[in-house]
Amino acid sequence: MTLQKSSGQEETKRTYAQAYINACHAVKLDTEAKYTEARDAYKSVIKNFSKLLIDDNNGMDRNELIGKLNEYKHRVEQLGRYMNATKPSSLYINENSPYQQRRESFDSEIIRTEQDDYNDKAKFSFDQGELNEYKGNMEHALEYYSDAAELYLKAFKGYENDSADKLEARDNFTRALDKAESLKKPSLLLPPSPRTRSSSNASDHHRPSLSSLHNRSSSISSISHCPTDDILTQKLSASEIEVLKHTSNVNDKTFLPWIDETDLKEQFSYPASKYLDPEGSLRLSDKQLEKFGGWKRPADIMQHPQLICLISSTSIIQDIVTDCSFVASLCVAAAYERKFKKQLITSCIYPQNKHGQPCYNPNGKYVIKLVYNGIARKVVVDDLLPVSREGTLMCTFSTNKGELWASIIEKAYMKLMGGYDFPGSNSGIDLHCLTGWIPEHIFISDKSFVADNVWDRILDGIKYGDVLVTIATGDMTEEEATEQGLVPTHAYAVIDIKQFRSKRLLQVKNPWSHKRWRGPYSHLDTQVWTDELKSFLNFDPCVAEKKDDGIFWIDFESVCEKFTSIHLNWNPELFTHRWVLHSVWPEHVGPKKDVFSLHYNPQFSLTVNVPDKKPAAVWLLLSKHITVTEENTDYITLHVYDNTSGERVFYPGTPFKEGTYVNSPHILVRFNAPPGISDYTIVVSQHEKEHSLYFSLRAYSLAPFKLNEVPIRHSTEQKIHGQWTEQTAGGNASNATYLNNPQWKLTIPPASAPVGLLLMLEAPKDFAVHLMLVEGGKRAYSVSLRDILSESGPYRHGFCYCELPNIKPGEYTVVASTFEPELLGKFILTIASSMKLQVESIPSEGAGMFKKVLHGEWIIGYSAMGCPSFGNYGKNPRYLLEIRELTTVKVRLQSINNTDSVPSMNVTIYEKHPTELFGKEVATSGPYTNVIQGVATGDVVLSQNEMGYIIVLATHDKDIAAEYTAIIYSDRPVNVKNDK
């Protein structure tokens, strides 16, 4: 409504204020199911509005007044109909709701502290109004000021007449109303519609769904690639958005990506009730269920709840939830904030005040920003906490009286993980989720572990506040654990690190807040604690012995001996250049194992430009997206190949940086890029792919770089399933049978422009295989280097490929061979290009024809007479070929058992002459040739004649002793016999 300034404005304002108070009171009664009183209160509101309508000069929008008046009249009519129902309250309360009993159990306590609760909530709403007004979110500021006015009014109604509290509530109501009016510029604050703020239960807050992500797509696409740590900003690609959408569904709940534009304007005020998570309570662990007494809000178990009292690692205690790594993470993050006076863990908690500090919300709603599945995500929780039958908290808590932050953050993390029955993880994973800091997992038993180097890195990082450190034990016997004061397979927080001369010491906290190390530098070690050392560490073992708080000192040598892992989380702001890409490796793409071929693996090109003379650090972090909390059986890693020009890598070979396969969701690879421009190809690898892998790849560097996904270049693939048989397993080109190998005619259409071509051959792992491409489209009988357009190089086990960036239109021949002949097995030939190509199998030599095989030898002085130049050509081995009808004939001549020195040979067919040695030449293999596959005539059509035809088998030089095989193919039966 627009209020026009006039001399009667003050009277109108008083009338309107009374209407507002009556309306708020009516809505309150309606919410409390006091329908008779509510109906009467609404009638009073109607009278107020009727009075305003009588005054034509009230300066208010008449249509809006009439609309609001009709709302209240409609509600009065509804209540009149419903008041005669058997259970009028059932219209608004779901008696089957799992939250009903919970709400009723709090009623007496809520009534007992009702006015204090109204004041707390009103003050919170007023502060949030100021925060939003300060940030320029005027619409939200108006909502909060309106909530504050409504709540102060409730408090005003509940206090005794003329009490100081009542007067203060009235003043606060006026202050909130004035704030709201000033933001309306200059319109009056609209009174609430019937029951518009009557509930915050599941019926009013719908569960987020993946469809919500579609509505957010335009906003998501404008997010910085890494909202927690990236400097550069670029819109996400459509495929990246789809990856983030898919992995927003975690443990059957949807966790939307965090978007400042909308999530910093989250509604945290609920005047009529307290927030209740519409997705229900979290699943409890077995130990919690044994002692479970109910869910309680902080105000029900604490006199003065507050979100943060004093951030301290020493005050945090792990209860019976099996999340020691998470609690250790909270401890180390709290120690960081305390030491460096910088927000780290507390920056992820909302609501916050105008100073950016998280604040207690008496309405019971909190939003936690957690980094998960590639991006910061929004986790909404209520403040109901699990309590035992004895009334004690059964979750992580703080020993600081009334402090809640650790319990609330844990609840948000447990909601993300599927419930309090969390199986556990490690602190590197947990800290990355809480802070976005880069996780590095160091296995102490690894052969590459160098204690001195690790210590120096940790000490340097701790000095400048750039690293968070946690450590973990492995399996140990009960006796060992008791003797050493350690817990098996347990995470510990490192809250301080000191070096005193040659002594390297860590201050460590057990998340249980009891049970301490009993070895060197513990409170029991009487040999090492000099006055100087105690002063340096500010530690007195005598005092420590009296109170077991789980905090102890331990030397680094003992850590390396008794612990199994060191988890480091590094500040991403150490790096001046950062970027991230989100991708998926579909289950159906590529073989189950990538032992022989990396072609189908996700690959990324990295170009680093180091302008200085010193190398620049480059870190790569692969993060698997997890949608179900369960044992991680996926062993993944990153391999980095250098000198690749950023192109796709096919053969595993020996990487520049070879990753280790581990079943952790985070894999970190570190290296230094040399001065100048360096190109790398990064390959994501799985030990054995069982399902689709969704992941994010982050790069961090001290030098400028470009990170891009290397696409699979060819859009069209044709797969040919074949096999090497007894007839086609010809072996490599040094075998006479090479010509029998499977071959295909590949046709590039004449009208097409040159296209790229990729040929890949997959075979059994113990088969060394090879591909060759030559021109012609006809069967290749031998290998000539000048004829080869492309080949796969040396024979490789299991997989080989060859590629041409451009191949012109024409006909080509593809040959697939094994190194050893007579290897029988199946294979897959993949032909990939930008368009579908015509591929057809080339029939084997003599396919469909009759075959006669002749064996003989050239004998020195008898039949090894050489070519015609030596004068005795006719004495070479000769065969008479008798033809009965028109017949197509082809003859192949091969030398056998003489692979080291194959003689130059020739085979020629002559007509038989009645008187001369030979008649007319009708076919020949051409020049004398010494290829191992032998020589052959072309197909020649011979007609029937009485004399027949003579086949002459000759070597170029005379006196060459060798055995031979002659194969005669014919499409009609023929008769062959020795002509001598």
Image (cartoon, rainbow, N blue to C red):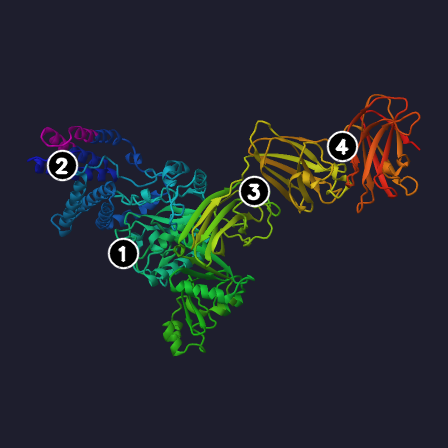
- Of 910 and 879, nearer the camera is 910
Residue 939: quadrant of the picture: top right
State how far apart marks 4 and 1 are (Cα).
Answer: 95 Å
- Whether residue 903 is in magenta: the answer is no
Q: Which residues are magenta?
A: 46-70
Mark 2, Cα crowd under 10 Å, few <14 / some 14-19 / many 20+, is: many
Label disc, if present, on residue 16 of the rendered structure: 2
Mark 1, Cα crowd under 10 Å, few <14 / some 14-19 / many 20+, is: few
User: Earlier along the polypeptide chain: callout 4 or callout 3?
Assistant: 3
Residue at left 26%, top 36%?
A: 196
Mark 3, Cα crowd under 10 Å, few <14 / some 14-19 / many 20+, is: many
Image x and y of residue 442, in percent: 50, 60
- Can you identify the residue that label 1 sits on? 303
Q: Is residue 943 left or right of residue 37?
A: right
Badge 2 element? helix
Q: Nearer the viewer, mark 4 or mark 3?
A: 4
Is the residue under label 3 in contact with that under label 1 (CB below 8 Å)? no
- Whether residue 69 is in magenta: the answer is yes
State how far apart marks 1 and 3 are (Cα).
Answer: 61 Å
Of the 4 image quadrants, the one containing the C terminus is: top right
